Image: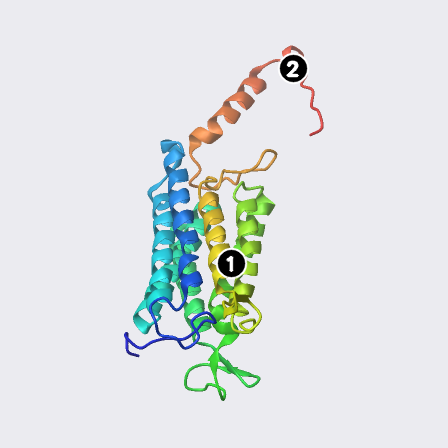
Amino acid sequence: MTFGEHVFLYCERGTNAALLAEPINAVSNVAFLLAALVGLQLVLWWPPEERSPDQFLLPVLVLFIGLGSLAFHLYADEGTALADVIPIGVFMLVYLGFALNRFLGVPPGFTVLLVIGFAAILALAGQVQCGEGAIGFPGAEPKNAKPCINGSLFYLPALAALIVIGFLLRERGHKAAPWLLWAAAIFAVSITLRSLDLALCDKVLLEGRKVGTHFAWHILNALTLFLLLRASLAGGTAAVAQGGIAPVSASTPLSRLAPATEEAAREDEEPVEQREPKVFFPA
């Protein structure tokens, strides 16, 4: 691999090596920059006592995703391809660790093991090649091999993780669940459009010029990332919706349990005849 070697992956570029061969794909990266800036502003608006350093890190990673993608769609060589893919991979791993630990309460050590396993899955998915009705890895590629579904196979593990974590949080009544599930739905559409870029190349035109659908991947993916940034502010394992039950673990501060414990103790000390009847109304 030579860093300066040109890469021709998307419909809009075709085989044109010029700097501005992908104007729409390049400009659509503004969506990532907007998502990062608005996400960072949300963190700054959040109460200081409810935010953490990792919530500042996430929008910075989204900013690097936008800059890396912009560089690739301008220069389109092996070096900028790495600048495009690496920030995306880092964001997926960081956010997975964040969601497992902060939302689901997975212990840090086990979270690290799960993230390492997920990184291995991503690496394998990125190496799979498809061609002539068969799939394989480098060294055993089928004839006329190329990345499966236009390279989108790399993103399917992240989609699966979003769906699983989103439904787990939904079962717990966590406030982050709707944000994650909406992000998963939009991400599924964006992956589909990314995969169809070359297949629809002759059909998606702008003033007679082939455009493809990769620009839509940028816009919808930026929206997905913004929803994930907003979800990161929804709180930790105790952030359950009204009527939900907050999970209690060994790390649960005693101060969260004290009010209920003290109230129960007072009720136990009161004579039964002095207790005021409590009326409950159905929700």
- Type of amino acid under label 2: Val
Asked whether the beta carbons under mark 1 and mark 2 sit within 8 Å of each other, the answer is: no
Give the number of callouts. Answer: 2
Q: Nearer the viewer, mark 1 or mark 2?
A: 1
In 3D space, how far apart are the residues under numbered discs 1 and 2 (Cα atoms)?
51 Å
Residue at image position (69%, 23%) is 280
Q: Position of residue 16 (x, y in %)?
A: 39, 75
Residue 204 or residue 266, whichever sits in front:
204
As displayed, is residue 229 above or below residue 71? above
Look at the image and tell me in which quarter the C terminus lies.
top right
Q: Is residue 97 above or below residue 50?
A: below
- Residue at the location (42% across, 82% down)? 138
At numbered mark 1, what does the secondary structure look like: helix, strand or loop? helix
Q: On the image, numbered disc 2 is attached to which residue?
A: 272
State whether residue 236 appears in this view.
yes
The image position of residue 122, as x and y in percent, is: 43, 67
Is residue 106 visible to us here? no
Asked whether 189 or 267 is in front, the reply is 189
Taking the image as shown, residue 239 lies to the left or right of residue 108, namely right
Identify the mark nearer the N-term, 1 or 2. 1
Q: Amino acid at mark 1?
A: Ala
Query: How far across and how far down the image is residue 61, in percent?
Result: 35, 53
Quick one: label 1, few (<14), some, or many (20+) residues within 10 Å? some
Q: Residue at x 41, y 70 (%)?
A: 123
Q: Residue at x 50, y 39 (%)?
A: 248
> Residue 267, labelled with which disc?
none
In the picture as drawn, the residue positioned furthest to the bottom comes out as: 143
Q: Residues within 10 Å of mark 2 (few under 14, many from 20)?
A: few
Q: Which residue is mark 1?
A: 161
